[in-house]
Image (spheres, rainbow, N blue to C red):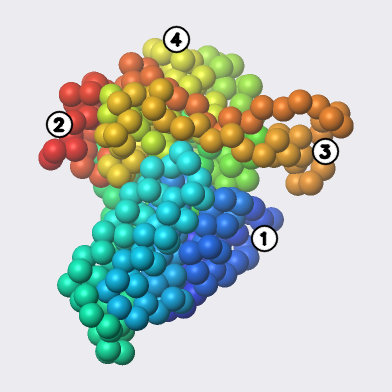
Amino acid sequence: MIPPRLIFKKGTLKILDQRLLPDRIAYVTARGAAQTAANITNMALRGAPLIGCAAAYGFALEMRRLKPVSGEALARAARKTAALLKAARPTAVALFYAADRMLNKALALSAANPDKFAPAALDKILNTIDREAGLLASEDEAACLAMGKYGAALLPKSCVIMTHCNAGALATMGIGTAVGVITTAHKLGKVKHAYSCETRPYLQGARLTIWELMREGVPSELITDNMAAHIIKTAGVNAIVVGADRIAANGDTANKIGTYGLAILARYHKIPFYVAVPTPTVDLAARGGEDIVIEERSTREVTHIKNVCIAPKGVKVRHPAFDVTPANLITAIITERGVIAPVTRASVKKHLSL
């Protein structure tokens, strides 16, 4: 079993520190929005759905910490808190979805309670905000189960499958998105073998995904990113499945750097390339991939592995954390509502209206 990623109690949020995995299981504690945002930024927690759930809990923590005295004070605190959380990372739309959802809940409560709060009224409001955060987390858990079912149905028997980065339980509150598809298919006896790309430079595939697959008993192997083409060609890979951090209205998909290259390989080798995401990952405000902000992260994550420098001192470095895969390279998008195929602006819009 994968350890709990988030443990929320009134006043505290314990966050599984994924920077220490797989060597050690330990938690850091957040007591407000600023600490939650810091842990999102510094990668103590990562994975788009989990970032969103953590942001919701961080919002609830902040409201309890501030204890607003009136509807006006609640609205003011809610707007400031949502903005703080959104600034933590720019690409994963689940963060923005969660912050906005919590903000809207708080604004509705403030409008319904415009006067100064009595202690009992404030407690009721804070409990309502806590419940909204919990609801968001439980929805993610249920979405993962549904994606696993829909995705597993797409895979052939004796499937040899490849994935990139970590879109498993560690990235969500449930069984995961892409890795959830793999583990669900494995339980149905459909997975012959799984390959996890290491995912340089932060090594989510090497540290997290292969760890999850091993713990779930999936027959699997770790490969370096530059082995992918060779393995696809020689090992009978017949499907690739990944997660995503943001999907534009036309189906263009932003995911961990290296995903675009795998999609090109899949097209050349005539194998399906699947993206598994919950529907809040779709950003209808982004018309295409060109509208998605690509986060540039620390150069140290490229030059160092576990604090050991592997590059010359003073080297110039680029570190785009994500790339965009064009919709025409994606066979299907798997969501908790079903499967989007073909991946077009019209099919994405129709799917979201279900």
Instruction: Give the residue type that dot 1 points to.
Output: Arg
In the picture provided, is 220 more to the left or to the right than 317? left
Circle 2: residue type? Lys
Would you place residue 106 above or below residue 84 in this image? below
Which residue is label 4 attached to?
268
Q: Which residue is mark 1?
A: 24
Q: Secondary structure at mark 4?
A: helix
- Nearer to me, 78 or 3: 78
Q: Which residue is mark 3?
A: 309
Residue 30 rendering spot, x and y as whole percentages: 54, 68
- Judged by depth in the image, the label closer to the viewer, 2 or 1, is 2
Circle 3 Cα neighbour tier, 10 Å, few/some/many (<14 / 14–19 / ≥20): few
Residue at the outermost left position = 354
Crowd band around label 2 with a 10 angstrom C-alpha radius: few (<14), some (14–19), many (20+): few
* Residue 318 in view (yes/no): yes
Residue type at the position of mark 4: Tyr
The answer for how far apart the CA atoms under marks 2 and 4 are is 29 Å
| Residue at 53% in and 53% down | 40
**Farthest residue in the top direction?**
268
